[in-house]
Structure formats: structure tokens, C-alpha cells
Amino acid sequence: MLNVNICGIEFKNPLIAASGTFGFGREYKELFDISRLGGISSKGLTLNKKEGNNGLRIYETSSGILNSVGLQNPGVDGFIKDELPFMKSLDTVVIANLGGGTIEEYIKGIEKLNDTDVDMVELNISCPNVKSGGMAFGIKCADAFDIVSKVRDICKKPLMVKLSPNAEDIVKMAITCVEAGADVLSLVNTFKAMAIDIKRRKPVFDNITAGLSGPSIKPIALRMVYEVAGAVDVPVVGVGGIISSQDALEFIMAGAAAVQVGSGNFIKPDICIDIIDGIEKFMIGENIKSLGEIRGII
Amino acid sequence: MLNVNICGIEFKNPLIAASGTFGFGREYKELFDISRLGGISSKGLTLNKKEGNNGLRIYETSSGILNSVGLQNPGVDGFIKDELPFMKSLDTVVIANLGGGTIEEYIKGIEKLNDTDVDMVELNISCPNVKSGGMAFGIKCADAFDIVSKVRDICKKPLMVKLSPNAEDIVKMAITCVEAGADVLSLVNTFKAMAIDIKRRKPVFDNITAGLSGPSIKPIALRMVYEVAGAVDVPVVGVGGIISSQDALEFIMAGAAAVQVGSGNFIKPDICIDIIDGIEKFMIGENIKSLGEIRGII
Amino acid sequence: MISYHKYSVCENEIVSKGIYKLSVKGSFEGKPGQFYMLRAWGTEPILSRPISIHDKIKDKISFLYEVKGRGTVQFSSLDTGDEIELLGPLGNGFDLSGLKGKVALVAGGIGVAPMFYTAKELKGVSLDLYAGFRDDTYIIEDFRKYVDSIKFSTDTGKSGHKGFITDIFDPSVYSSVLCCGPEIMMKKVVEMCNAGDVPVYISMEKHMACGIGACLVCACKTREGNKRACKDGPVFNGKDVLFDA
Amino acid sequence: MISYHKYSVCENEIVSKGIYKLSVKGSFEGKPGQFYMLRAWGTEPILSRPISIHDKIKDKISFLYEVKGRGTVQFSSLDTGDEIELLGPLGNGFDLSGLKGKVALVAGGIGVAPMFYTAKELKGVSLDLYAGFRDDTYIIEDFRKYVDSIKFSTDTGKSGHKGFITDIFDPSVYSSVLCCGPEIMMKKVVEMCNAGDVPVYISMEKHMACGIGACLVCACKTREGNKRACKDGPVFNGKDVLFDA
Ligand SMILES: Cc1cc2nc3c(=O)[nH]c(=O)nc-3n(C[C@H](O)[C@H](O)[C@H](O)COP(=O)(O)OP(=O)(O)OC[C@H]3O[C@@H](n4cnc5c(N)ncnc54)[C@H](O)[C@@H]3O)c2cc1C
Ligand SMILES: Cc1cc2nc3c(=O)[nH]c(=O)nc-3n(C[C@H](O)[C@H](O)[C@H](O)COP(=O)(O)OP(=O)(O)OC[C@H]3O[C@@H](n4cnc5c(N)ncnc54)[C@H](O)[C@@H]3O)c2cc1C
Ligand SMILES: Cc1cc2nc3c(=O)[nH]c(=O)nc-3n(C[C@H](O)[C@H](O)[C@H](O)COP(=O)(O)O)c2cc1C
Ligand SMILES: Cc1cc2nc3c(=O)[nH]c(=O)nc-3n(C[C@H](O)[C@H](O)[C@H](O)COP(=O)(O)O)c2cc1C
Ligand code: FES
Ligand code: FES
């Protein structure tokens, strides 16, 4: 009843743990049965191991959190060797989230992932493009087209492209990514935001800006998902501030095929289970047999 | 100590009541001495009287509110006749916030305001441009340049242009508006966002989307103000989620000459006074003699 | 004069399932049909909640409220001595000055809340209370000493007439009708009164933000254009209101 | 095994100005230097707060905390019977197994919290407590039966040595040092221990989100790269840590 099929891959339910908040699942497995999840998106990977950013990495705002982890990760090889076997031992869809600073890095990362049993690749195009002065790949359509089409050319896995809410025009960006070959879109990544420590008279983060996530961004993320789902023919995965079944259902009614939960995992480690159960309860109460009946219904 | 001068106009302090949340001040005057405010920006005016939107107009989100008032207002003539004399009787800077659906409407509105003793005009370019298919004037730089330069040509008042956070590139938009003749920039207006009533399976608002304001947007608004203040030479007025002196000081340290408080007025009708007092207390505690010492200090 | 202050709760008792009566000590202004914006939290949720004056005696004001969402849930958890912020009195209230002859108070559910203070203050007329409830009735016995008759209904038939209160209400015998309840019920009452040309005044519930008339989020459509429910209302002449439903 | 459950507070008492001791009934796991993520609110603030095990007896666990910001303010307002969520035990804790000879516990301010359970569990060694405070001292008398000596300081000179605890601490006489306190103080202690080649273990305080090792927001810089304070720590070998300050 809760299952969804996204480009041929069967998810037992529409709940996916969002990249960067769930590691590779290992730690959460000690707390609950993570095989109950529809899928897990890995911590954002880069071709080579990264140590991430210096200074404070997390800061709370009203109904939100700012993070500046800076893609600390073991690199694609480390992932394949040390994390993937564990993830594949679970009964859930395994998504490798990939970032990078240059197109070559992305390409090499994809080549390595091609030869694994990863179920799907999620391309994080919010990373600063080191060659174009640090502006993220996901801001301008032309940059996004370039990277997505090159990745698509060689990627043997279903390709989910994760959009940045900082894109100049989210709908055009979505259309562009689909034209470039994206099989699925996920949105949104974090909003560029900041906080200032007025006592120290300095930005809270060494990098000055950081990424905003959590319930505070939900109304904007929902609007973007609604607009994008109406503009493209590929499945759309909704992300941004989802912490309850009500939230998840709003995204589904806005047109999302599935949803991801990020910051919510920090509120309650097994919040995804509560959300899955809540969706099921709603469906029973409203006599809905399949999510298809309400997807995009508004 | 708290005073600021913005294009020749003296504000006794940097606190301005934001457009649309404070009416024309009349109602708040019954509750506290509104002449203690640095300024008041009027309810958004249009050339002709408007009845505004149908259906629900306000909805709460996590640390935010969505509104869909739709510029209900008495029209510029009604304002000049019935509201301006009252506002001018106060000892505070009077700002007329002007919107419109066509350039002609804006121009005619400005012509009428030119002949009054309004202190400053705030141009709201977040209004949907009826001639270009409903996309707001404030999304694309070319549209904004067009309207701001035409208004600048005839406007005899200091011109503050209020930017939309939905602009494709907020920094370019700011630079464009300054090039087009803006004397001051204020930002941000509300974020395009939405909510869904899952029981009714319908958007909460008749218009589907609505404008998000309140503490939830603060980290993004602050980032935008910081980026804009660093990119233009004109004064910048910070708006978005300010509900405490800590918030206001963050905007000032990010480079804002003054700040506006919108949704905060709903939390506590005299919240602006608390903020003014809080800033003063901070300055005394930190031995700051003038706001210039900390403006843009980060 | 509208005032905005912190008070401490002096009583907050459950009077029926999901219905509470909250009292605050102090000397308050306000006439029947006026309301206060209540707040018992910091910054979240952002908006205060509009609640009608249920009763007011020399040194105490009372509110009768139904637990609906997160605001009223928080009210229901208040204990004696806890802080509550009150902004008011707000709105126009019922104009009782011109009423004479036979007057009907027609209430649906929690719409009975403002009717109590109204009944108490309405003098020199003959007064009947009509009150419709879902299942349990509440506080109607308190009206005894202020009204000539009490008629009531329940949707479930638990007590009183089984069905809608409009089933047993005949406006034709009244010189004026005051009404508060769900919009759909008020619409019906207005239609009935209009048919018999009986003046009817209704209290409209619109979502509010400022509560004082500044923000225009509480627009009520009337024949004369949008009116502010918080300032021009909440009481409107039934003949003027254009119902959404 | 890490567990995540709701409990009810059995005690929450003030032990000194701004310092509270909160106890929860239940059978808990955890060794000295490990911590729990505590939460006593719904969804706002989003993050739970990491607090060390202060004491643990058969059917009860205690936390000693200082009121700092909005999370700890909320903890301080908890009454007996109120709900609290606990996720833990988390982190590595102090490795007490290899310790012998003379051991020093060096605490700065609220860093004394984990030291109590440490002192209690640390057997077969000769143990001295060094504790530095700002103005008032707290709970140090509780250590009497578990340590051989207690030395303490206050910045203000209100009691004990006036100045820093590091003024009166000489690592050279110890075979190991366990330390918890402000980063600047731990840095100093590590430098002193390194100079005398004395093994030193420190408990690092990093802001945390998941608390279990998944999100990488709690990175602690070490000679072997970034480590997760919540999982690989919070206790690190003082020689490995690269201090920010
Ligand atoms: C003038 C006036 C007088 C009222 N008098 C009473 C009274 O005496 N007793 C009583 O129980 N209720 C009264 N109400 C309704 C009461 O305001 C709502 O039930 C209450 O605001 C619901 O808040 P919540 O947080 O529990 O619900 P939620 O649904 O969580 O509220 C979400 C938002 O919607 C608003 N809202 C929801 N329902 C209503 C409603 N029916 N009317 C206005 N705003 C609403 C809330 O104020 C809040 O901003 C009155 C409403 C108005 C406008
Ligand atoms: C492993 C570990 C064990 C701890 N043990 C104790 C203890 O036993 N007793 C005690 O009083 N304190 C302890 N702390 C510090 C305690 O976690 C913070 O004082 C507390 O989180 C502050 O929360 P707040 O909401 O009151 O402050 P705020 O400043 O409002 O907190 C804002 C955010 O910053 C985080 N934060 C602020 N200060 C710290 C800090 N020093 N360390 C980590 N995160 C911080 C908060 O968790 C929250 O996410 C420990 C910290 C860690 C990492
Ligand atoms: C601590 C943290 C780390 C994150 N790391 C990544 C990442 O590595 N790759 C990525 O695509 N998104 C990352 N994100 C973004 C989330 O996957 C998600 O898109 C975003 O947080 C919005 O969802 P939420 O509001 O549910 O958290 C991270 C978010 C957080 C809070
Ligand atoms: C109910 C409401 C009505 C508003 N009306 C207007 C308006 O007429 N013109 C305008 O420029 N901005 C309007 N705004 C936007 C505010 O002036 C402000 O830019 C925005 O709310 C962000 O600030 P805040 O987070 O402090 O509310 C309105 C906001 C609200 C909440
Ligand atoms: S609630 Fe603001 S005008 Fe009525
Ligand atoms: S807090 Fe998440 S890894 Fe340490």
C-alpha cells in the first residue's frame, strides 16, 4: 500500500533518509530496524576523502539548523570498500549521494560507482564548482546542464539529481536537468543562510554562510516541489523540513513520489518510522489504497 | 546614539515598522507611543483601491506565517486623504510603500505621492507584473531595471526599493536597482511558499502560494542582506524575521543601516520598543557610541 | 481603551469534554461580543488566539474555550498562577442599546461562549436562548437566571432536540436575533431571519494576526466590501455579510 | 546498547547557583565519561543536549548541568514526573581499565560533572581531585569518600586557591590524568602533562546533532584527522587533539 516504484526501483515506502544526516545507516541500525525505510541516501561522497570544514559545524535557528559540515566523507573508494557492503546487507534501497568540485571528479566518482551494486545515484549539484569561482553547479542552468549531461552519458545507474533551492529559477533548473538526462529529481538541498555572533562580532561559521534545513524551510521547499512536479515528467522526491506524516503527505499531494527526511532524524532517531506509520494510518482512515490516489492531487 | 541618517533623512533609531503589518499606525497608536519608532512603512498602496484576495489570508508554519492579503488598500488617493495627515502628525519618518501591476500604475502613484509630504517612498517590486504574465517585477533584473529607472526619473522623494528574496540573483538584483537609481534598498519581502490542507486535499490558500515571513526566514534574509550590503554603496535596510534586539543587531553587523519588523508585531504589539531598548542596552554594555561602529563589522 | 498586559491565571477548569473556562483576575473593560487576543507562550506559535468575553465581573474576566489546535491545547494546560497575556477588549461587540421586545440568542457549539455575557448585560427585553451542540451540552444551565427560556439540540440526540438548533428556531416571533456559531449555521440563521425580515446580528470567526485592525488578514466580505472582523466586527449585520461557504 | 526512551524525572534540584542535578529512575547502562542526549521538549529546538553521566546507581541515573541557554533553561524548569527523553549511553567514556598508581582528576567548572561517576568507578588507584570554579564551588564534598585529596580553586578567591586550578596542579607526580573542562583549560593541562610526559585523557565538548556518529557535525581535530566527538570521543588522548583555541 505504501510502496512506490521510481524508475524501476521498488521502494517499500516513500521514506528515504536524507544524505548527510544518516551517515551510512550504521549508527541508526543500533537504534531501530532501518530496513523498514524505503531507502537511505548515503553521506555526500566525493572522489577523494575529505576532512570537511573547520570551526563550528552546527547552529540552531528558529525551527531550523544551519550546518557547515563541508562534505567530510571517506571518498568513493572508502565508501565502496567500508560502507557499501553494510548498506547492501539491509533490505532497503541504497542511494549513493555524490558531490564534487570539478566535472572530472564527478565523472570519476560515477565510474567507480557504476561497477558496484548501488541501487541509485543521487547527484548533489549544490557543491561549489571550484573551476567557476566557487559558485555552486546548481545555481545556473547552463552549469547544471553541463554536469548532468556528462554524468548521464556514463552513469549506468538510475540518476537522481538533487536540486539546490538557491537555483536562480527552480522550475527552469528542473526542466534543464531532466533535459540533460536526470531520471529523478530530489529537492531541496539546504538554503544558503547565516548567523552572527553579536558578542564576538563575527559570523558564527568560519565559512560565513552555511546551509539552512529543518521545519523552517518546509513551506518554501513544498512550493518548489509543487512547481517542479507540475513542470517535469520524471518522479520528484520532496525534501525539506519534513518531520511528521502531515508534512510528508503535503509533499506527496504536491506531487512528490517519495520524500526524504534530514534534520528530523535529530529530533527523534526513529522519526522516519513514525512518519511511515502515520502515513499508513492516514491512508486507512481516508480509505486510500495506494499513494498514487493522492499524489499531486491538489 | 541610536539615530541613523538615510539619504538625508534622520531616523531617531533604526527600527521601522514593516509594510503590511502595521497598517498606517493608527491602531497601534492606541497601544503605545508609536512616535518612538524610527519610521513606519505604510500598508502597501496601489494606484486604485484594492479589495485583496479571497479565502483564508493567514496560516501558521514552524516559526513563520504565510500570508495572502493581496494588497488590500485604500488606493493612493485614499491614503493621501485619510491616512497621511495622521501619519504626518506623528514624530517619525513616514514611508509610503507602493506596489502595482503595471509600470503606468506605479508611475501614476508616484506622481501623486510627489506632491505630498511623505518622507520616503518604498517601491515594492514583488508585485506580479500583470503585463508579463504575472511574474513579479522583482524576479528578473531587466524587469526591475525598467520599473526602477522609470520611477526614479519622476520620483521627487528618496526612493527605497524593496527587493524580493525570490529574485533570481539577489546581489545582481541589488546592483541593478542601484544602477537604475534606487537611493536605498530594503530586503527582504516574503518568500514564495505554500501549505496544503491534507484533509481537504487542497492548498490552504485560494492563490495556492502565499508569502512566508517571520523568524523562520531570518537566516536566509540575513545572508541576503550581508551579501547585498557588501555589493552596493547605498544604505541597506534589513527585513525578515526580526523579533529581538539580537536579531536586529545581527542585521546591523551584516551591514544594515536600519531594520524593519513585520511579523514580530503580531507576537507583541510593542515589540519594536523592546528591540530599540535592547539595542540601546547592548550598546551601553559594549561601550558602543554609535551604530556606525558596528555596522557591517563582521 | 485597548490594553496589553501580562496576568496570572486564577482558574482554568474543564466544564465539559474539551471545553474549559479560564479566568483572570483584574479589572477589565469590554462589552458583550467583544474579544481578547490570548497568548500563553513565547514566540512560537507567532499568533495569539482570539477568544470572546464569556463573563466579566468586578475583578475578574472569564473565557470559555474549546480545545482545537496547538494554541488552545496550551491554554488547557495552564495552571493557577501561570502567566497569560491579554490584548483587548477588541472588536465592536453586540450593540445592545437598540434592542427591545423579544430577542433570541442563537448559538452553535462554542458560539455559546459570548452569549453568556450578552444575556447578562441585555436588560429590559424578553430573552430566549437557542443552543445547538454536537453531543454534550455545556453551561446552558448558567443562563437560567438571565433568559426566559432555553431550547437546545444535539446532533447525536444525547439530550434536547435531536438535530440542528435551526430545526426548532422560528425567527418570526422575535424582534431581533443575535447569533454566534459555525459559519454554515449562521448562514442558515441569516437566511431564516431575512425571509421573515427579522434583524439579525452575527459574530464572525476569521483567522486573525494583529487583532486590532492593522494587518487586514481577517477580511470579512460584506456588501460594502471587505471589513476587518477584528475591528469593524466581529459582529456584523447578517444582511450585509457575504458568506464564503 | 544505546537506547532511546521517554522517562519521567524523579528529581531536579538546584545544587548551586545555576547548577542543577536531575535524576531519572530506570535501569541505565553507561560508564564514566559517557553521556546521554537529553530532550524535554517537542520539536523546537531541534537538537537534544549532550549531558554526561554524573552518577548512576542501581535504579537511577543522575545528570549535573549548568544552565546556559534555552535547552538547559528548559531542563531547569522540569518538575518531578515531567517527561524527559534520553538517548544513550553515547561515546567512548574514560578507559579506566589500564589506570594504576596515582591518578589525578582535573575539572574546570561543570566539567566536574562526569568526574563524580569516574571517581566512584575508579578502583585500585590513589586518586586526587583538582577542581576549578568561577565563584561558588559545588558537589566537591561528595567526592570525599572516593578520593584521597581534594584541591580546588575559584577565580574570585571566594574559597580555595584564588586563581586557576592549573596553578596548583603538578602533573609530574601522577601516572595518569583525566580532565574535563573548558577547552582553554584542557589545552593548558595537556601542555603541562605533555611537558612531564604524563598520559592525559580529556573529554571534548563539541556541538552535536545526532549524538551517535552519523552526521559529522561534532568533528574534533586530531593528529589522525577529524574524529567524531560523540562516537570516537568525547574522551581523547590529550596528545592527539589539535586544539582550536
Ligand atoms: C472574534 C472571535 C472570537 C472567538 N471566541 C472564541 C471563544 O470564545 N471560545 C472559543 O473556543 N473559540 C473562540 N474563537 C475561535 C478560536 O479563536 C479558535 O478556536 C482558536 O484560535 C483555535 O486556535 P488553536 O491554536 O487551538 O487551533 P489551530 O487550528 O492550531 O489554529 C491555527 C490558527 O488558526 C486560527 N484559527 C483556527 N480556528 C479559528 C477560528 N474558528 N476562528 C479564528 N481563528 C481560528 C488560530 O487562531 C491560529 O492562528 C473565536 C474566534 C474569533 C475570531
Ligand atoms: C559530551 C558532552 C558532555 C557534556 N556534559 C555536560 C554535563 O554533564 N553538564 C553540563 O552542564 N554540560 C555538559 N555539556 C555541555 C552541554 O551540552 C551544553 O552546555 C548544553 O548543550 C547547552 O545547551 P543550551 O541549550 O543550554 O545552550 P545554547 O547555547 O542555547 O545551545 C545552543 C546549541 O549549542 C550546543 N552547545 C552549547 N554549548 C555547548 C557545549 N559546551 N558543548 C556542546 N554543545 C553545546 C547545544 O547543545 C545546542 O545545540 C556536555 C557537552 C558534551 C559535548
Ligand atoms: C548535517 C547535515 C549534513 C548534510 N549533508 C549533505 C550531504 O552530504 N549531501 C547532500 O546532498 N545533502 C546534505 N544535507 C542536506 C539534506 O540531505 C537535506 O537536503 C536538507 O537538510 C533539507 O532537508 P531537512 O530539512 O529534512 O533537513 C545535509 C543536511 C544536514 C542537516
Ligand atoms: C500580513 C502581511 C502583510 C504584508 N503586506 C505587505 C505589503 O503590503 N507590502 C510590502 O512591501 N510588504 C508586505 N509584507 C511583507 C513585510 O513588510 C516584510 O517584508 C516581511 O513580512 C518580512 O519581514 P518579517 O519576517 O519581519 O515579517 C507583509 C507581510 C505580512 C506578514
Ligand atoms: S487581525 Fe489584523 S486587521 Fe484583523
Ligand atoms: S553529533 Fe552526529 S556525528 Fe557526532
Image (cartoon, coloured by chain):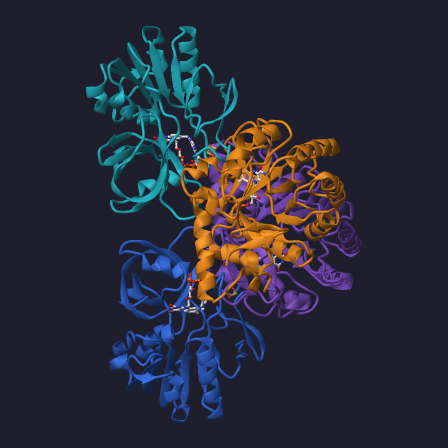
Chain colours: A purple, B orange, C cyan, D blue
Residue A203: percent from left, percent from top? 57, 64
Q: Considering depth in this image, is B278 or A246 the residue closer to the camera?
A: B278
Q: Considering depth in this image, is A201 or D240 the residue closer to the camera?
A: A201
Residue B136: percent from left, percent from top? 68, 38
Q: Considering depth in this image, is A36 or B187 the residue closer to the camera?
A: B187
Q: How many marks?
A: 0
Residue D151: percent from left, percent from top? 31, 85
Q: Residue drawn 53% across and 55% down?
A: B3
Q: Is residue A79 visible?
A: yes
Q: Residue drawn 25% across and 81% down?
A: D144
Which corner quadrant of the image does residue C184 belong to?
A: top left
Q: Name the residue at the left extreme.
A: C145
B119 over A41 or under it: above or below: above
Which corner quadrant of the image does residue D38 belong to?
A: bottom left
Residue A30: percent from left, percent from top? 47, 61
Q: Residue drawn 57% across and 65% down?
A: A205
Q: Considering depth in this image, is C16 or A233 the residue closer to the camera?
A: C16
- Left or right of D52 in this view: A82: right
Quarter of the image containing the N terminus of chain C? top left
- Left or right of D76 in this view: B175: right
Q: Is residue C46 visible?
A: no
